[in-house]
Image (cartoon, rainbow, N blue to C red):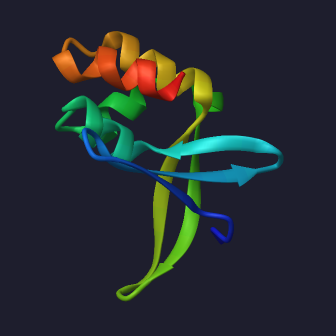
């Protein structure tokens, strides 16, 4: 279950949720893909290595659901693959 969810907000990019699991920071894949203009987050995440993504259970108004989260190296992988003008600005904000 997600307990330590943190939300980072930026007026240019919106919100990116993060969570710490086993001492490692994970980024919610859907949020990252939204910022980068990646329409199909499932496809983008499926191209990452297995050790770069995890499924996290969370409670929602509709019941329990799973969110896909990605590691920091996977975050940079998605940023570097993006051709969107926002990607470069997002990379600078993240780093």
Query: Can I make out residue 7 in this image?
Result: yes
Relative depth, front residue between 58 and 7: 7
Q: Which residue is drawn at 82% across and 45% down?
A: 23
Spot occupied by residue 43 in the image (x, y as percentages of width and height): 29, 33
Q: What residue occupies the far right of the structure in this picture?
A: 23
Marks counted in the figure total 0
Query: Can I make out residue 78 in this image?
Result: no
Spot occupied by residue 66 in the image (x, y as percentages of width and height): 48, 64
Residue 88 placement: quadrant: top left
Spot occupied by residue 21 in the image (x, y as percentages of width and height): 74, 52
Q: In this view, does 86 lie to the left or right of 76?
A: left
Q: Residue at x 32, y 20 (%)?
A: 89
| Residue 36 higher or lower than 20, as above or below | above
Q: In which quarter of the image is the C terminus?
A: top right
Residue 72 placement: quadrant: top right
Q: Quadrant of the N terminus?
A: bottom right
Spot occupied by residue 13 in the image (x, y as percentages of width and height): 28, 40
Q: In this view, does 3 lie to the left or right of 76?
A: right
Q: Which residue is drawn at 25% across and 39% down?
A: 12
Q: Which residue is drawn at 36% across and 26% down?
A: 90
| Residue 87 higher or lower than 7, as above or below | above
């Amino acid at each position: 279950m997600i307990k330590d969810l943190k939300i980072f907000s930026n007026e240019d990019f919106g919100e990116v949720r993060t969570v710490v699991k086993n001492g490692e920071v994970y980024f919610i894949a859907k949020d990252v893909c939204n910022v980068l203009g990646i329409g199909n987050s499932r496809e983008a995440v499926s191209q990452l290595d297995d050790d770069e993504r995890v499924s996290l259970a969370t409670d929602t108004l509709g019941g329990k659901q799973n969110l896909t989260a990605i590691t920091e190296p996977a975050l940079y992988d998605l940023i570097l693959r993006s051709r969107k003008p926002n990607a470069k600005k997002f990379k600078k904000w993240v780093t």
